[in-house]
Amino acid sequence: MKYSIILPFLATTVLAAPLESRQAACNVPTTFPTTANSKLPNPFKFFNGGDVKTKADFECKNKEVSAAIQAQELGVFPPKPSTVTASLSGSTLSISSTEGGKTVSFTVSIKTPSGNGPFPAIIAYGAASIPVPAGVATITFNNDNIGAQQGQSSRGQGKFFDLYGSGHSAGALTAWAWGVDRVMDALEATSATKIDPKRVGVTGCSRNGKGAFVAAALVGRIALGLPQESGSGGAACWRVSDSEKAKGKNIQTASQIVGENVWFSKNFNAFSTKANTLATDHHQLAGMVAPRGLLVIENEIDWLGPVSTTACMKAGRLIYKALGVPDNMGFTGSGNHAHCQFPSNQQSDLTAYINKFLLNQDANTANIEKGPSADVASYIDWTAPTLT
């Protein structure tokens, strides 16, 4: 009797929804715009020209953005393998994934606080270069083991490619995100780790900061992204970096990064000298994390593009504001310190985000926008709506 009443009501509700809100039930395109545009792409406009008006629309738009960024930059992010198993021995969590008759295995090490838990945790690429507070576990993740990053000759090497083939479209950043996704599978299935899988963050610095940003964007179970000094390919927008380069700045751009390493898909090579034809840019990488927690930690070194990261992340925060959660994202830049060293003047920002998103404490994360002067308005020709 209950179902005979509820189902017709639900059907009526769906049919009554406006067309622009349904967006054909999130039909995601398989081809994407490549029209040159020096402005940052509008995160509130579908590729078919329709407006993003609601939070449900934005979920569809994010699927569209994810598909485009995978097609043009990152390579395909595979779904969960057919079989994933995990076992814990001491502080070592072993994870095996099977697909298409092939199996690969890797391990992560877990350092937990004293007590019974469950504890929040931060997955650290390589090793944590940010101070992890005493009440938070650290999961050390050897991302190089999943996808090698030793120059162009290392493309297609690592556990990910052993499973999916050396010719897979994914770059190393995507392979690493896949590894983080499997760590999340293992944490959900293995209570003996004493980790709460709903309170897990991810961090890394420099090239690993790019990886942490991409993992936060692609892995929806990550509660808090903490990319550190990710620069080009991370918190910087390709278009803004090109603009800064044209002004004479010593800044990494897409044309340089594709020759340096294998972080991106081979598909990205076609856009390296014409990044203004990409369907997306990295303010939308931040938007892919929304409404989850995101604190972007930057260093004001020219090569990392401090103006580009600041302008790009200001645009990213406009997405969070449109969703009604502006304080779920912040960015903090600081100069006069060595690469991947964490300065004390960024500690309060980091503490606030960890307290809020991992420790479930009341914490003030309002209006954390710290960086050099950067006029985001000069890089956008759209305004952020209030999504209902």
Image (cartoon, grey):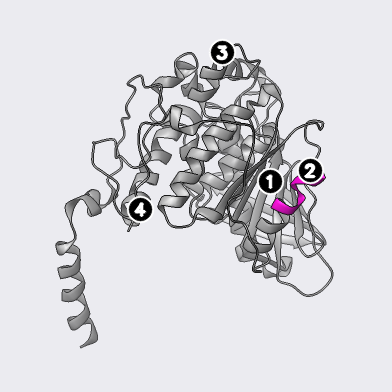
The reply to whether discs 1 and 2 touch (Cβ–Cβ < 8 Å) is yes
Q: Secondary structure at mark 4?
A: loop
Q: CA distance from mark 1 to mark 2?
A: 8 Å
Earlier along the polypeptide chain: callout 1 or callout 2?
Answer: 2
Query: Identity of the amino acid at label 3?
Result: Lys
Work out how far the residue at label 4 is from the one at label 3, CA to CA, in angstroms: 35 Å
Classed neighbour count for the residue bearing mark 2: other residues with Cα under 10 Å, few (<14), some (14–19), many (≥20): some
**Alpha carbons under labels 4 and 1: distance apart:** 30 Å
Q: Is residue 377 left or right of residue 119?
A: left
Residue at image point 68% right, 22% down: 302
Which dot marks residue 203? 1
Determine which residue is flagged by label 3: 247
* Quarter where residue 253 is shown: top right
Please name which of the two marks, 4 or 1, marks the residue nearer to the observer.
4
Mark on residue 129? 2
Dots 2 and 4: beta carbons under 8 Å?
A: no
**According to the image, label 4 marks what residue?**
386
x and y percentages locating residue 288 in the rendered image:
47, 45
For mark 3, does the 10 Å Cα neighbourhood hold few (<14), some (14 to 19), or many (20 or more) residues? few
